[in-house]
Amino acid sequence: MGLTDSASVRDMDMPPTLLSESEIQSRVDELASEIDATYADTEMLVLIGVLKGSFIFLSDLARRLKVPHRVEFIAVSSYGAKESEHADPVRLLMDVRHGIDGEDVLLVEDIVDTGHTLAYLKRLFAAHEPNSVRTCTLLHKPDRTEQEVPIDFLGFTIPDVWVVGYGLDYAERHRTLPYIGELPPEMR
Ligand code: 5GP
């Protein structure tokens, strides 16, 4: 197989674009301005990124913020179908390193799907008695909502499709694409 052939095989492997790199970048600019305006009087904002999906969004967002901030990460996993009778469908795998009592906290998610993860995290962090807890997500699929949770800063509303790229994966693939693609069932 020649070079051209292998390049076209690779292209066929690329998920079709839902949101282009430039659309994402300009929306992240706008989100950073909204967040700066909301926290204009805050001495130190605590950004908490939810691993792994939010790591690219959070790093782009954080580098645009003018408000002083520190970055924390947490990791969660969803319970599988077998454990679905469990009261909480989400489990904390890694907690923040430093306490957040009295702090202004902004939870940064890649995508809100059913809403269970964000609802769980809001409850979890509210119990630590921070000064405030707000939520920021790049993507939201309202058609999939099972649990309503307020989103204070939202990038894009998208239809009920599986998306990859810009931090989001499918079985660890496509995470570092610079755009957000829609992964059709035949590509899974
Ligand atoms: P929720 O608890 O809102 O149902 O799910 C949130 C998590 O599900 C996200 O943080 C993400 O890990 C995963 N998720 C939901 N929809 C998608 C999607 O379209 N693509 C990817 N890559 N992950 C998704």
Image (spheres, grey):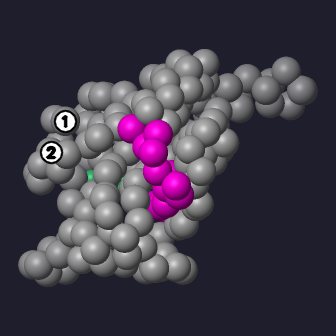
Question: Residue, x 38% and y 45% (percent of image)?
Answer: 136
Residue 8 in the image: above or below residue 47: above
**Image quarter for residue 130?**
bottom left
Task: Read off the residue under disc 1.
Answer: 142
Q: Identify which amino acid the numbered label 2 is placed on.
A: Thr
In the picture as drawn, the residue positioned furthest to the right comes out as 2
Q: Magenta segment, which residues?
A: 38-56
Residue at image mark 2: 145
Dot 1 amino acid type: Pro
Q: Look at the numbered disc 2 and give the secondary structure of its residue.
A: loop
Q: Is residue 32 magenta?
A: no
Using the rendered image of the protein, determine whether residue 60 is visible from the camera's viewpoint. Answer: no
Residue extending farthest to the front is: 41
Residue 119 seen by the camera = yes
Left or right relative to 32: residue 125 = left
Q: Tell me if residue 47 is in the magenta stretch.
A: yes
Please provide percent x and percent y for residue 22.
Answer: 60, 18
Mark 1 residue crowding within 10 angstroms, few (<14) / some (14–19) / many (20+): some
Q: Are marks 1 and 2 in contact (CB under 8 Å)?
A: yes
User: In which quadrant of the rendered image does the N terminus lie?
Assistant: top right
Q: Quadrant of residue 188?
A: top left
